[in-house]
Amino acid sequence: MFTKEDLNQMKQMGINPQVAEKQIDFFKNGFPFVQLDRPAIDKDGIKIFSEKETSDLIKSYDQNTEKENIVKFVPASGAATRMFKDLFSFMDDWTGSVDIENDNKFSMVLEFFENLPQFAFYNELSEVLKNEYNLDIEEEFKQDNYISIISALLTQKGLNYSNLPKALLSFHTYNEETRTSLEEHLAEGAMYSVSANNNVKIHFTVTPEHLSIFTNLVSKVQPKFEKLFNVIFNISYSIQKSSTDTIAVKLDNEPFRSNDKKLLFRPGGHGALIENLNEIDASIIFIKNIDNVVPDHFKNETVIFKKAIGGLLIKVRNQIFDFLKRISQGENSENFVKEICDFYKKYFFVDIQISANKSKNLDEIKTILNRPIRICGMVKNLGEPGGGPFWVNDANSMASLQIIESSQIDYTNDNQLSIFKKASHFNPVDLVCSVRDFEGNKFNLTDFIDPNTGFISKKSKDGMELKALELPGLWNGAMADWNTIFVEVPILTFNPVKTVNDLLRKEHQPKID
């Protein structure tokens, strides 16, 4: 299938040719649909804590953080292009006389321009129009010169927002100051991700072409935030590895070749970041998307529940470590086995199957317990797009808790579709993880991936259609074999910015005195 030149190309990228062949098999045969058993709900897969329980978990977290090596992991390499989809469509349709006030097609564009001064980037946009275009933003708006304003916002001659990652866009206004989403993650991390000696470790995944902009911004603002929050930041970065890129194929499933005749490999989606996560040296890792941040006056709710799920992780992890140490020391009484089973049922909603063979029981229990742990915040399903929490059957009809996306569902199966629609919660990407075993060794996280949970999408290159493959999602199939607990968190903790107009929501606007 591959030429000598192909093999050399893959060798340089660190890609195993057998892996590429397996990916081509997925293109030919597709990924198997998941088999939903039931939605995860309150008391059957989702834990909902009382105010007192939440308060106790926060207290426990605060008492233990100095003993922990905590890292906040932020996937931040995604481009902001899709945030401006409606503005790009408007530019494509512009003829010089589009009536945005009376054409429903442009309602989002109308909302954008009617509220233009409320965006945190307004002053920057005004400056770039003046300096690069010799135009006044207010005059351009009065004369309906929308294209000049959009060009100054999105193109390289202006702020170049369509080509930057979301991390580097101005999200929020504080008096005369603005903050990017990256800066908001620094502020948020200083509020809950603090280890011994006031150290705050934050890790951003970035694209190679933007790394210098990230480091320049951080070096500029880090002293300010260290002084503001009385912490010491340790900021690190990583780039998605070329070895995790996936092969692209033509519509007939033959390898796609670019104009230079080389094989085309594409980034494997956020699931590839399991490799980056695998290299983080920490006892506790918080994971949160780059765009899900709010100004300081709205952060309290986020901090409360970050600490709560962190406290739960420490509590559950410490108990599991205690069980594993006692197993390794030879404890094997029936009461001990029952203690473990009761604990696992209480926190993970799973009955551990017991056999008559004591040693076999403890071997199986050790395998069940000795895995990475993740606590995932879940918000009530109010119609937002995204995956949700479900009980999913494996090949042996054993059910486990998983985060499932709509692309993994067989829409021709009425039963599966019915279960999917009954989800009471959805996934806001709000995780805290334990990635070391009871002896302090790092797990190899790639050992816990379900490789059959990727998906295929249609793309184009050089004017030709192609099929692309995304690896099992970071919080989906890439964590399929982790010990998982779902916890309800308030909807106020979920404020993503999927379109530029999301920045007009009150959760992203300045505090009103």
Image: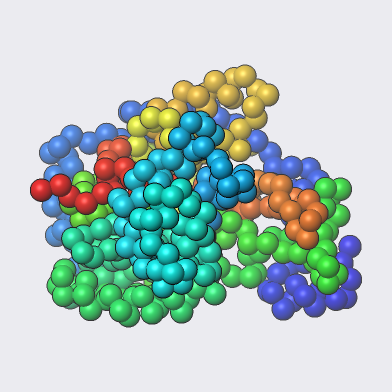
Quadrant occupied by the N terminus: bottom right
**Percent coordinates x, y for residue 500 in the rendering:** 42, 49
Q: Which is more toward the observer, 433 or 398?
A: 433
Figure quadrant of residue 507: top left
**Residue in view at x 39 percent, y 30 percent:** 381
Q: Which is more toward the observer, 130 or 201?
A: 130
Q: Is residue 320 left or right of residue 271?
A: left
Residue closest to the far left:
513
**Residue in view at x 47 percent, y 43 percent:** 109
**Percent coordinates x, y for residue 33 in the rendering:** 65, 36
How many discs mark residues in the rendered view? 0
Where is 145 relative to 214, above or below? above
Q: Is residue 161 visible?
A: no
Where is 293 relative to 190, above or below? above
Figure quadrant of residue 263: bottom right
**Residue in view at x 78 percent, y 51 percent:** 465
Q: Is residue 50 left or right of residue 395?
A: left
**Residue in view at x 46 percent, y 79 percent:** 212
Q: Which is more toward the observer, 231 or 508?
A: 508
Which color mode does the image show?
rainbow
**Percent coordinates x, y for residue 206 in the rendering:** 49, 69
Q: Is residue 13 visible?
A: yes
